[in-house]
Image (tube, helix red, strand yellow):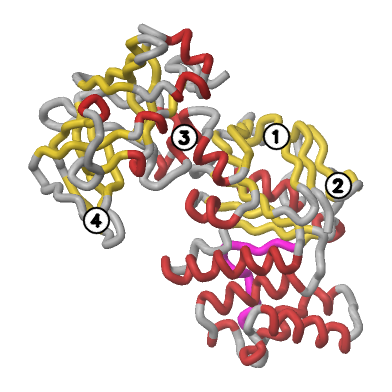
Amino acid sequence: MAEVVLDQVNKVYPNGFHAIVDLNLEIADGEFLVLVGPSGCGKSTALRMVAGLEDISSGELRIGDRLVNDVHPKDRDIAMVFQNYALYPHMTVAENIGFALKLAKVPKEEINDRVRKAAATLDLAEQLDRKPGQLSGGQRQRVAMGRAIVRQPKAFLMDEPLSNLDAKLRVQMRAEIATLQRDLGVTTVYVTHDQVEAMTMGDRVAVLKRGYLQQVDTPQNLYDSPDNVFVAGFIGSPSMNLMNATLGGTADAPTITFGSHTLAVDRSVLSVRPALASYFGQRVVVGLRPEDLEDASVQTGAPEDRILVVRTALMESLGSEIILHFPVDAEPYSIMEAEFEGDDAITAVPNDEGHFNYVARVSPRSAARIGETVGLVVDTGRFHFFDPTSGLAIRD
């Protein structure tokens, strides 16, 4: 086991494309760090540089106390798990798991012993004589994990290893991988574009955008205290509602106005965000997570100035909750369209009345009906505020 340190690491391709820009990361010995971000953000490139599959243009990469910029991949003492498993179809499970040890000329008895132990850990003991074609997707992924485990490397590198599995199996496998990593205590760098996967697996999560590290923190801190609108919009499902607004009122009775709606803001917001005091009468970006709204018919007794009256456009009933979509005449933070890329792009499209759609996560006991008016209690103490020019969180 060893820590992995990226110090001012850059990757510039021959065509001039700057894929990774001054990346600084310290991954502690035994830590599970997840790299997450939209397609093209540089997360796989960063992982491949750690593996030695991509050259580093500048900066330093250390594994343990060893500088490995120019060290061949096979000599870095790391093990990589790929998206496509990369198993040899003509070999048995046992032969696949032990293949790297065989190449390293490890004694046969030791190979057999390590393979048996890895198979027992991964619940593959009954499949050792089978070939990959006879296994399920989940079992094939376990074989790929077993091949990494038997090498007893200093670090595991995993590049979207669950993306080829169906939804139910992904949930099962991510729990198994997280448990296995904790049991083994091996430093692990895991790449995914799925922010739910990142939040449920990582000790810490590093969010990238266009080659730049946006924020690295624990999953809960990313969720509670995003540093900018990109992290705020990327972390959380459904995404945070982000809209242009104006901060009004006074320090004793602050208000927020978006579109034709004005709500009272909990005074505690100013005490935890003292820098917000300089924004009175000015435009801000206000963020509100869907789960911080509730149907007023369920959460009774809320003051009128904390209730947002809207008309329901769509309801998604999930049994344990309802995802409620509603239009508001407030413009979303327009830069969000440029913040995301490819399949992750967010394009705000107004309805026929020029209103934009927002989302609430409400109780399944909600009395809301499509096309009808509903009052939504807004937990204004949970508002997030961002500077409209820089996109940075307004805090201290």
Q: Is residue 329 above or below residue 184?
A: above
In the picture of the structure, the residue carrying the numbered disc 3 is: 232
Type of amino acid at the residue the image marks with label 1? Leu
For marks 2 and 1, give the CA distance: 16 Å
For marks 1 and 3, give the CA distance: 21 Å
In the picture of the structure, the residue carrying the numbered disc 1 is: 23
Q: Secondary structure at mark 4?
A: loop
Going from N to C along the chain, the mark reached first, 1 or 4, is: 1
Tell which tag, 1 or 4, sits nearer the viewer: 4
Tell which tag, 3 or 2, sits nearer the viewer: 3
Tell which tag, 2 or 1, sits nearer the viewer: 1
Q: Residue at x 87, y 84 (%)?
A: 110
Q: Quadrant of residue 42?
A: top right
Could you say which disc has been placed on residue 37 in the image?
none
Q: Residue at x 78, y 74 (%)?
A: 150
Tell which tag, 1 or 3, sits nearer the viewer: 3
Q: Residue at x 74, y 35 (%)?
A: 9
Q: Secondary structure at mark 2?
A: loop
Magenta stretch, residue numbers = 79-89
Q: Quadrant of residue 269?
A: top left
For marks 3 and 4, give the CA distance: 26 Å
